[in-house]
Image (spheres, grey):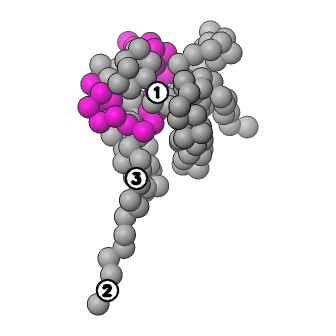
Amino acid sequence: MLKEPEMPFDRRIVLLIDDDEEFLSELQESLALSGYIPVTASNGHDALKAARKIRPDVILLDLKLGAENGFTVAGRIRCDPAIARTPIIMMSGHFNEVDHSKLLAPSAVNIYLEKPFGQKDVVFSIQTVLADKADKAETPVNIMKHLLRRV
């Protein structure tokens, strides 16, 4: 008798927030293939509602969300006690000088990931913030631990 392959028992939920539907779909597929449970939102309002409902393990947040700013959405997440400790990975292909100065100051973001990035980059980033969260489970969220850039 053939045994069905077992699913990982500890699959992590990743909330993906981006207004680019094509990019969101590709990232969702990539993370599902990597063993994560991806949930998507295309704007900050829907993302906050989803985060409160599903309590994701990690949030991947685009810097530019149409009229919204990813830093503003991240700040709202950090102000909500139910989801404030959720690690946030900021994604963008449009970091400018103002954004770079924000990167140097303490912020609500754990990791910055510059687009375009590969599947290995995003999985590594997720694993890094989950490991940091596990290491510091009883302490406040450690902000701005890493800055990832493609070479």
Q: Amino acid at mark 3?
A: Arg
Which residue appears farthest toward the front when viewing the image?
Answer: 138
Mark 1 and mark 3 in contact (Cβ < 8 Å)?
no
Q: Is residue 105 left or right of residue 17?
A: right
Q: Nearer the viewer, residue 4 or 112?
A: 4
- N-terminal label among 2 and 1: 2
Q: Is residue 4 left or right of residue 123?
A: left
Residue 2's disc number:
2
- At horizontal 58% and vertical 43% (from top left) the residue drawn is 131
Residue 106 x, y percent position in the rendering: 62, 14
Q: For mark 1, what is the residue?
A: 85
Q: Which residues are magenta?
A: 49-75
Q: CA distance from mark 3 to mark 1?
A: 19 Å
Identify the residue at image location x=33%, y=81%: 3
At horizontal 59% and vertical 30% (from top left) the residue drawn is: 111
Residue 137 drawn above or below residue 104: below
Q: Is residue 57 magenta?
A: yes
* Residue ID for mark 3: 11
Q: In the image as oriented, which residue stretches furthest toward the bottom?
A: 1
Q: Quick one: SS at disc 1? A: loop
Label 2 element class: loop
Which of the 4 image quadrants contains residue 8?
bottom left
Q: Are marks 2 and 1 in contact (CB under 8 Å)?
A: no
Q: CA distance from mark 2 to mark 3?
A: 24 Å
The question of residue 20 being in magenta is answered with no
Residue 113 versus residue 67 in the image, above or below: below
**How many C-alpha atoms fall within 10 Å of the one at disc 3: few (<14), some, or many (≥20)?**
few
- The reply to whether callout 2 and callout 3 are in contact (CB within 8 Å) is no
